[in-house]
Amino acid sequence: MTGSAAAYANPRTDFDGQRGDAAAGFVRFDPMKLVWVGAMLLGGTIGSALTVTPGAVVVFIVFTATTLCLGHSLGMHRRFIHRSYECPRWLEYLFVHLGVLVGLAGPLGMLRTHDTRDWAQRQRHCHDYFSHGQPWYRDLVWQLVGTIELASPPEIRIETDIAADRVYQVMERTWMWQQLPWAALLFALGGWAWVFWGICSRVSVSIIGHWLVGYFAHNRGEQRWRVSGAAVQGYNLPWFALLTMGESWHNNHHAYPGSARLGLEPGQHDPGWWVLAGLARLGLVWNVITAEQLQIRSDLCVVGSELSQQPSAAG
């Protein structure tokens, strides 16, 4: 660890004059979310059931793994949002595009959603929407077809080089439509079966899986660290580690948000990190940040200890 002890701060949300209130607000129905999620679910269930073929299933597995690992985990989360490693701009664009294909939102929408949730969870009190604090069936409806409306939302100060980037602006405006070129390619190669499995089933499983892991990762599981004063804590979900490309080590992530490595301890499988380490050996990524390089946190406690001091993370 480096530097003197200080509480974690996200420069996009944690600055003098931030006036947001994380607790006061309500969840409203979002008709566009219903149309999007509903269309993917219909195609992914009925369409896929009527057109199942071995080739289509292989397309589903390979395309899902690719978009979740290179796209959501390495591109959208570890690079675009947390800037935990550097890479050529063309590679960042490719990874973020694959992250958009997961079907959750555009890049700027994902960043705002992530940072708002991250900020809210670190307040002393926050709305149940951010904490996944309702029973699973209500939280499922809230997250899939609802949008939080805070009475006083936080200001999100996105870096100029991101907010003004024309490629990201186009991705943001067209994030749903970016499935179409891939759908056309899949149709040309394998007909409707490949479209239903490669687009609809993949997006449906990714959206529901993202909610499922998020729900449990904030409610139960293994826990080594706690963030003092935070309304919401993260939990590690070992059984989901391989399926989520390492993203289910959520207690680790709450402790070390800026670390490109999420599986910190021996035996904590982190496929995203394995791929990132391989890319580093090829010279395609560099300046990779790990937990050992981050500033010591004054607000991080070992579970079961009253000491506000975290142990060294495994290398």
Image (spheres, rainbow, N blue to C red):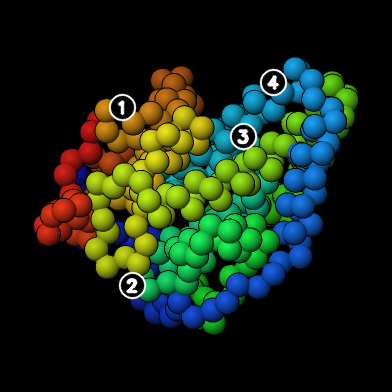
Question: Which element is circle 2 on?
Answer: loop
Examine the rendering and report whether any part of residue 297 can be seen: no
Q: CA distance from mark 4 to mark 3?
A: 14 Å
Q: Classify 275 as above or below 241.
A: above
- The residue at which mark 4 appears reads as 58
Q: CA distance from mark 4 to mark 2?
A: 46 Å
Q: Position of residue 290 (x, y in %)?
A: 31, 38
The mark found on residue 123 in the picture is none
Q: Residues within 10 Å of mark 4 (few under 14, many from 20)?
A: some
The mark found on residue 267 in the picture is 1
Amino acid at pointer 2: Arg
| Quadrant where the image shows the N terminus | top left
Question: Which element is circle 1 on?
Answer: loop
Labels 2 and 1: the sequence-earlier one? 2
- The residue at which mark 3 appears reads as 67
Q: Residue furthest top?
A: 54
Amino acid at pointer 4: Val
Q: Residues within 10 Å of mark 2 (few under 14, many from 20)?
A: few
Who's the residue at 27% across and 28% down the image?
266
Labelled pair 2, 1 in contact (Cβ < 8 Å): no
Q: CA distance from mark 1 to mark 4?
A: 28 Å
Q: CA distance from mark 1 to mark 3?
A: 24 Å
Who's the residue at 61% across and 46% down the image?
208
Amino acid at pointer 3: Thr
Question: Which element is circle 3 on?
Answer: helix
Q: Position of residue 268 (x, y in %)?
A: 34, 31
Does residue 8 appear to the left or right of 176 in the view shown? left
Q: Classify 157 as above or below 95.
A: below
Does residue 38 appear to the left or right of 242 in the view shown? right
Who's the residue at 76% across and 18% down the image?
55
- The residue at which mark 2 appears reads as 124
Q: Nearer the viewer, mark 3 or mark 2?
A: 2
